[in-house]
Image (spheres, rainbow, N blue to C red):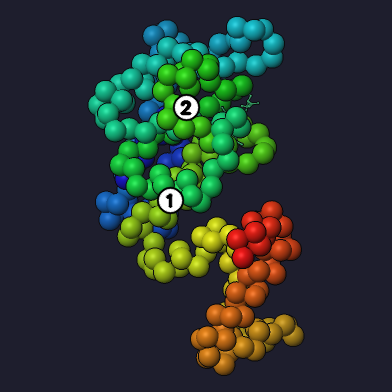
Amino acid sequence: MRFSYVTLFEGLIASYFEDSILKRAIAKELLSVEFFNPRDYTLNKHGKVDDYQASGGAGLVFFPQPLFDLLRSIKHASPEAYIIFPTPSGKLFTQNDAKRLAKKKHLVFVSGRYEGIDERVIETFADELFCIGDYVLTGGELPSLVMSDAISRNIKGVLGNEDSLSMESFESPLLEAPCFSKPPIYENKSVPSEFLKGNHAKITSLKNKMSESKTKYFRPDLFSRFNAKH
Ligand code: SAM
């Protein structure tokens, strides 16, 4: 997978790939990461990429020219590039999107700043728009990283143990059951005794029950979807 980031702030994104699972994925050549700064494509000599809104009112927006030129050159060099705009106006990003997008070869994330991006850029280049939650962030860098991270986990070879994917939250309508480690009792709190007896059928049955009650409590919206199917 090739990830391209269009951003004014490369450092915010680059540092995330300098540790842990995604660093190893780059070393194994499962991922590659590159950056494009819209300022390098602007035709004005001050490197300006933002301007006042045509409608008047508070706040600046990315004006079209630098992003048109930049995205056109990416598309020209890589026709398979699939362009994603993080924006509060997009559809909510989900695990299904992460799995679907993990099958692409080249994803481009265009990070907005200010009040956002001139709509004509989005109309011309967007393959998809995604929102990562109902709140507003200062820029698209975090949403781009959130999506890239979730997508990367679904690329074969990125996770050490791919079995860990199948039981996770959002793989079914239910959240994952609570996890426990050692010791069996810590500060008077016990691991469920069934977990320690080694009967895998009973452990699975208990985990399913815990999964249901956790989902019912924390995510009644998911639980009603689960109920409708059973
Ligand atoms: N004026 C915009 C609005 O009200 O929808 C918000 C602009 S926000 C300050 C700047 C940039 O941050 C956006 O262009 C987008 O790239 C990113 N952004 C902010 N919140 C986001 C969210 N919840 N999901 C995805 N992207 C977001």
In percent of the image, x 74 and y 63: which residue is there?
217
> The C terminus appears in which quarter of the rendering?
bottom right
Residue at far bottom of view = 197
Q: How many discs mark residues in the rendered view?
A: 2
For mark 2, what is the residue? 8
Residue at far left of view = 77
Image quadrant of ligand 1 equals top right
- Percent across and percent down for residue 117 are 53, 20
Residue 180, image quadrant? bottom right
> The N terminus appears in which quarter of the rendering?
top left
* Label 1 CB less than 8 angstroms from ligand 1: no
Question: Is residue 190 shown left or right of residue 29?
Answer: right
Image disc number at residue 99: 1
Q: How crowded is the residue under tag 1: few (<14 C-alpha within 10 Å), some, or many (20+)?
A: some
Q: Is residue 150 visible?
A: yes
Give the mark, 1 or 2, whose residue is nearer the N terminus: 2
- Percent across and percent down for residue 112 are 53, 27
Q: Distance between the residues labelled 1 and 2?
A: 28 Å
Q: Which amino acid does label 1 sit on?
A: Lys
- Percent across and percent down for residue 175 are 60, 63
Image disc number at residue 50: none
Relative to 114, say whether 145 is above or below. below
Q: Is residue 2 visible?
A: no
Q: Front-most of 178 and 139?
A: 178
Relative to 107, say whether 95 is above or below. below
In percent of the image, x 67 and y 7: which residue is there?
56
Q: Front-most of 126 and 15?
A: 126
